[in-house]
Amino acid sequence: MTEFSTMDLPKHLHTRIEAMGFHTPTPIQARAIPHALNGQDVLGLAQTGTGKTAAFGVPLIAQMLEYGRKPAAGTVRGLILAPTRELANQIAETLKGLTEGSPLKTGLVVGGVSINPQITRLSRGTDILVATPGRLLDILDRKALDLGSCDFLVLDEADQMLDLGFIHALRKIASLLPEKRQTMLFSATMPKQMNEIANAYLKSPVRIEVTPPGKPAAKVTQSVHFIAKAEKLGLLKELLTAHDGERTLVFGRTKHGMEKLMKVLDKAGFKAAAIHGNKSQGQRERALKAFKSGEITVLVATDVAARGLDIPDVKYVYNYELPNVPDAYVHRIGRTARAGKEGQAVAFCAPDEIGDLKAIQKTMSITIPVASGRAWEEMPDPAAKSSRGGGRGRPGGGGGRGKPGGKPGAGRRRFGGGGKSEGQGGGGEARAAGGGAGRQRRKS
């Protein structure tokens, strides 16, 4: 099946699909839609950016257009759960485009905005509701919504919902849905707990896997800089200056850290904004809108922006801090090289992140090419990973970019060999965090 026109879809939906520029289904769409149209439960495994929204949205809308009646007050017919506000917003926008001109109503409930207007809109009845689990539970706890007549349940980016700790919320929500329903679950990975969820929520599902886990877009060029933590900011500024004006995403682990980094970059003259969990929904939407329009060119973010966001023409993705979940790296770099375009993914690896880098490379079954510096485990002794170098020597690499770092003091080692140095004397210093302390996972 190679065209939407060959699928048994309502005429109005065909018209909207063409108007939105969808002509040839992606692999996940081509394989999932026919089964979903037949009412079967679907378990879809595909990376972010492969067209999963239409894979569940098109058959859901097609079946609802055949209903010929409005939903009762305070009820929903189809529920779509997504892990982040940004992804929920994007799903809702796509569905509104597909249902434009039809009697179907699409609702959205997410945190970060007032709950009362959302409750008021839901009281009128909703055909398709897109929600984040936390806000939906708030509404259900207020008895403001009845899921007893919901015919469809979609869990999108289900593995990320598990990562974010929504497992108990999912179980509570599912218990309020009728047993007789169609359920579709889409995920980029299939951890053990996901199998348990699938077995509990789906009935004899059709399993569709189109993108092997851990595989990024084909046209992403990857590289890694081995660099002391204290030197990351200087290198980031240098690289951003080299391609000033290009749309760029910078990822890190913590909300506080990314907010601080954004402010430093903004003060340095870069057009920067930030997205993370401490931002209100309005702030996050304004930042995304400015990034898409080109008003800002550098978006600093935690992993809330790593999945599902279709931002056109992102040329560079910087992993300023490596994620401690390997799959998150794949999702981060999936924000570039979309729709067949080329992009670059650049990672910064400090000494205490070498374990994360190894895990990422193992998951992806590749060795990421080194752009500069020398792999920390190649140094003569482990103390070098947390020692101080002379001067502000950035880890060298590739040979011949300049002189090595400054002369080390007694008993100290340099960070790397043959690399460009900033500050040749022995007075300054560059620090790298030691690898001895156990890392804690941080929420974004």
Image (cartoon, grey):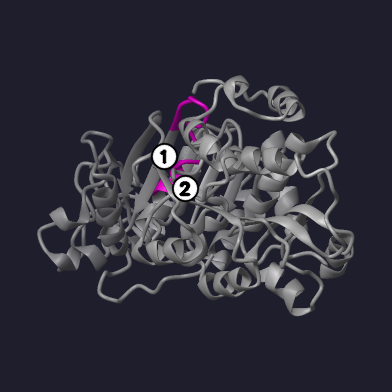
Q: How many neighbours does mark 2 have within 10 angstroms: few (below 14), some (14-19), or many (20 or more)?
A: many
* Residue closer to the observer: 256 or 24: 24
Q: Is residue 399 placed above or below 80 in the rendered structure? A: above
Residue underneath mark 1: 345
* Residue closer to the observer: 40 or 242: 40
Residue 232 rendering spot, x and y as whole percentages = 42, 53
User: In this rendering, would 40 be left or right of 209?
Assistant: right
User: Callout 1, which amino acid?
Assistant: Ala
Residue 240 part of the magenta-drawn span = no
Query: Residue sitting at 41 percent across and 62 percent down?
Result: 194
Residue 236 rendering spot, x and y as whole percentages = 46, 46
Query: Residue sitting at 14 percent across and 53 percent down?
Result: 378
* Residue closer to the observer: 175 or 227: 175
Residue underneath mark 2: 332
One can see residue 387 in this view? no
Q: Which residues are magenta?
A: 330-343
Q: Cβ–Cβ below 8 Å for labels 2 and 1? A: yes
Quadrant containing the C terminus is: bottom right
Query: Residue sitting at 56 percent across and 39 percent down?
Result: 55
